[in-house]
Image (cartoon, helix red, strand yellow):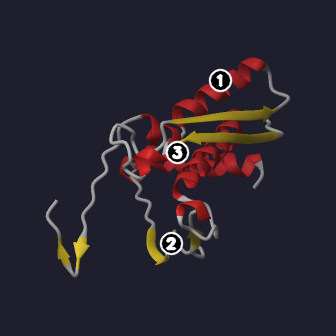
Amino acid sequence: MTQEALKAALSNTVKGIQDNPLMSRVVFEARTALVEGVRCSGTVRDFPPMTVDEPPELGGTDRGANPVELVLVALGTCQEIMYAAMAAMMGIRLDEVKVDLKGTLDLKGLFGIDPGIPPGYQKITYETVLRSPASAEELRMLVEAVESHCPVLDTLLRPVEVTGKVTLNDTVMAA
């Protein structure tokens, strides 16, 4: 999609929201299932299922990225999408956008060896590389816009309500 087409599509969506504010609330859905061992299948919309697995040292068969790697992919790709979208809206040409990410996780938390260590990431770092003929000031404004509006970055940085339930043999278990 060209930058002009992207800007037109996004402008249409913004106008639709301005005309009908209730249109702004969207729900994304995914469905997952354990397949074998620790290998899982994940489905989003009408796309083919994706395989999620662990490396052999974590009991998997290495047939796909693991969930914590997918968190990194989600953050990096969300940043890249936001750069494309914001640059289109701001009229800034981008020649390259890529993000390198690292997540630090202590397996003592995952395996319950040390209750003082959380099972998830303790630190995520990223480096975004941009190539553009735009001025430093235009790019500073672009970076600020992306950093303050990236949904995945926002989700990772602030507390988000997460609720769930477990159904066992067709009966909801008490929490």
Dot 1 surroundings within 10 Å: few (below 14), some, or many (20 or more)? some
Front-most of residues 22 and 115? 115
Q: Which is nearer the N-term, disc 1 or disc 2?
A: 2
Q: Nearer the viewer, mark 1 or mark 2?
A: 2
Front-most of residues 151 and 1? 151
Q: Is residue 126 visible?
A: yes
Asked whether, in this view, residue 58 is left or right of residue 159, the answer is right
Q: Which is nearer the N-term, disc 2 or disc 3?
A: 3
Q: Secondary structure at mark 3?
A: helix
Residue at the outermost left position = 174
Q: Secondary structure at mark 1?
A: helix
Q: CA distance from mark 2 to mark 3?
A: 37 Å
Residue at the outermost top position = 137
Label pair 1/3, CB-CB below 8 angstroms? no
Q: Which mark is residue 14?
A: 3
Q: Count the marks: how many?
A: 3
Asked whether, in this view, residue 3 is left or right of residue 31, the answer is right
Q: Nearer the viewer, mark 1 or mark 3?
A: 1
Place of residue 69 in the rendered image (x, y in percent of width and height, measured from the top left) = 58, 53
Q: Residue drawn 27% across and 59% down? A: 164
Q: CA distance from mark 1 to mark 2?
A: 41 Å
Quarter occupied by residue 1: bottom right
Q: Which is nearer the N-term, disc 1 or disc 3?
A: 3
Provide the residue designation for mark 2: 40
Q: CA distance from mark 1 to mark 3?
A: 20 Å
Front-most of residues 24 and 61? 61
Place of residue 95 in the rendered image (x, y in percent of width and height, measured from the top left) = 83, 39
Q: Is residue 91 visible?
A: no
Q: Residue drawn 44% across and 74% down? A: 33
Place of residue 160 in the rendered image (x, y in percent of width and height, measured from the top left) = 35, 42
Provide the residue designation for mark 1: 141
Quarter occupied by residue 66: bottom right
